[in-house]
Image (tube, rainbow, N blue to C red):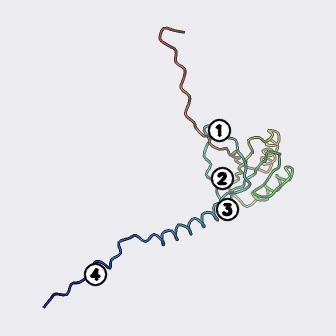
Amino acid sequence: MSLAKRNEGQKVNSNINVTPMVDVMLVLLIIFMVITPMLQHGVSVDMAKVNNPESMPDADKEDALLVSIMRDGTVYFGTDKIPPDQLTGKVKDRLANKTDKRVFVKADARARFGSVVEVVDNVRAAGVDQLGLLTEQRKTTAAPAAPTTPAGGQ
């Protein structure tokens, strides 16, 4: 009489099946590609770059009031194009039911200074308590080494 040999070890598949993981990653990629453009509030502006900007996390909130000034002097209140002289009335209307009277201004780095001052004056005339000027962090690069003089030389 011979013993029956069980052969269950050969049926086990030890390879990792990555197909479900790839499917999940592709779905996440598509979701992020669709949502990312919606995260930006207002109009895209090439803001001035500074060394030490102060962080203003309230500017990223959904209900934040953003005024954008383009390079050519065009003014946007949120995503709506508006003449600068009508800005005071629009800001007053939006601030009427808010307790936090704060407006953020995004000005293009190459916008004329006069148009930025005009927008700031119009926003201030609407009764804004705090006005935030948004900037970007300047990219830091390694500082060049200071030239050294040889010992005993000039």
Relative depth, front residue between 138 and 104: 138
Which circle, 2 or 3, is nearer the viewer? 3
Do labels 4 and 1 touch, CB within 8 Å?
Answer: no
In primary-sequence order, the first of circles 4 and 1 is: 4
Relative depth, front residue between 41 and 146: 146
Q: Is residue 133 above or below residue 80?
A: above
Identity of the amino acid at label 2?
Answer: Ala
In primary-sequence order, the first of circles 2 and 3 is: 3
In primary-sequence order, the first of circles 2 and 1 is: 1
Quick one: label 4, few (<14), some, or many (20+) residues within 10 Å? few
Residue 62 point in image, percent of width and height: 66, 60
- Which mark is on residue 8? 4
Identity of the amino acid at label 1?
Answer: Val
Q: Is residue 16 above or below residue 148?
A: below
Label 3: element kind: helix
| Residue at the (81%, 47%) spot, across then down | 122
Which residue is the site of mark 2?
Answer: 59
**What distance separates the C-alpha of mark 2 from that of mark 1?**
17 Å
**What distance separates the C-alpha of mark 2 from that of mark 3?**
15 Å
Residue 90 point in image, percent of width and height: 81, 56
Which circle, 4 or 1, is nearer the viewer? 4
Quick one: label 2, few (<14), some, or many (20+) residues within 10 Å? some
Residue 100 point in image, percent of width and height: 68, 55
Label 4: element kind: loop
Do labels 2 and 3 touch, CB within 8 Å?
Answer: no
- Which mark is on residue 38? 3
**What distance separates the C-alpha of mark 1 from that of mark 3?**
26 Å
| Residue at the (57%, 64%) spot, across then down | 29
| Residue at the (66%, 52%) spot, across then down | 59
